[in-house]
Amino acid sequence: MESTNLHLLSTYLKKWSFNDNRIAFNYSFCLGEIYERNRIDLRMNTTTSITNDLLNHIFHRAKELLYGETDEETESRQNGNNIILVNESEVKRKLGVYLTRIIKEYNQNKRNRGRARMISTRSLDFYYNDFEFEPLEDDVKFFVHLNRGVNKINGDLWSNAIDDFKLALAVRPHDVRANKNMALALKKIGSYEEAVPYLKICIKTDETSESLETLASAYIHLKEFKKAETIFKKIAKQFPDSKLAALGRAQIAYKLDKPYLPVLDEIYAVEPEWLREKLAKEWDYTLPDYCDTEECKWNAAIAARYLGFERPIDLTKKAFNGEVPCYFDPEKGTIRFVMQELEHWVKISNRYELYPESYKIYPEKITKEEGAKAQLKETNPKPVKKKTKKEKTEVPAEVE
């Protein structure tokens, strides 16, 4: 009888509910080339009962992924193939220790009506110990590293995740999942130039409108607008119904200080909810002429007055929630705002009803000096290299 090894990689306590007496876990496993991340909601019970319920659910999910929908043909294949949980006895032991701690803490918190803090380790890595990890085959090690990186991304530990993705890519340099997540982590910490090669690998294997758009957005952040524009034209040609291409054109127009609202209006007329979500979560308000100039940025007190907020903290809360464009320096602990970006934010927020409230700007609430400061632009631009005679006659290379 053939067998397929199932490696349980990690579990994570997502939440618990005293009212419903339930507990939710995220879990991940690999099964041959299958990599699964999922979630289960269970009734709070004994350690043994929760362990059995969790493992039974995982086995059921593994069978669904391996065999697809149950029918006579797949049932016959199941009879000839057995799923084996690797190190089953050790997995159950670790789950037992992990769940016993969580159940104990759950009961203590329930008695205290939730006032006590959760102090237990919420996550469990089944291959944390070197003596368990080292004997694994390279294919399984790849999924261990990939999974650890994704777990760290979910915990907003972007820099730490990069280290795990490097280890995964050392095993499988061209894996789309690892390259995609590596690019995502690099973009999140602002390393757009480093993210580009990983995105190109993804596109070679999986050229979707989403993967192309991600590469184009990286070029936008690098101020390589021609390359981004070429990609968006490619998206429009290969995927005529793609809204991403239109949104990308609008983003480039915004960056180049050209009319962008008519393009957004076209999308809004067809897919208003989709556009609202994209604008609220992904629209980049950064203006190239201002983003690198500290002198032109306002502090929270000035920006709050300009937008009509009673207190600066009301504005900074929205900024930290990603609702208002800002520049935060974690080392200095400072937050800054650009007047022109705030004006565009007000215009877009109101025009497409991104939030329940509408916003206004109040020029009369800032001083002349504050207004003059906000008009400053980048100085000392990079010198333009003069073209040689040869360069002038050459045909431009195709944009990547």
Image: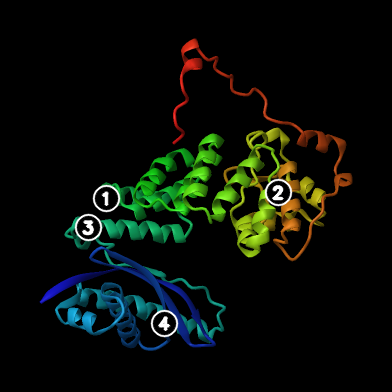
Residue holding disc 1: 172
Counting residues from the start of the chain, the first of labels 3 and 4 encountered is 4
> Where is 94 relative to 180, above or below?
below
Among all residues in the image, which is located at the extreme top?
389
Residue under the point 40% across and 52% down: 180
Residue 139: image tag: 3
- Helix, strand or loop under label 2: helix
The quadrant the N terminus occupies is bottom left
In front: 143, or 225? 225
| Whole-number angstrom distance, CA of label 4 to CA of label 2 | 56 Å
Q: Distance between the residues labelled 1 and 4?
A: 41 Å
Coordinates of residue 171 in the picture (x, y in percent):
25, 50
Provide the residue designation for mark 4: 104
Q: Which of 253 and 336 is in front in this view?
A: 253
Please rate how many residues cluster around mark 3, counting C-alpha atoms within 10 Å: few if below 14, some from 14 to 19, many from 20: some
Q: How far apart are marks 2 and 1 (CA)?
A: 43 Å
Residue 153 image offset from top left, x and y in percent: 44, 57
Q: Earlier in the sequence, mark 2 or mark 3?
A: 3
Q: Is residue 223 visible from the viewing direction of this image?
A: no
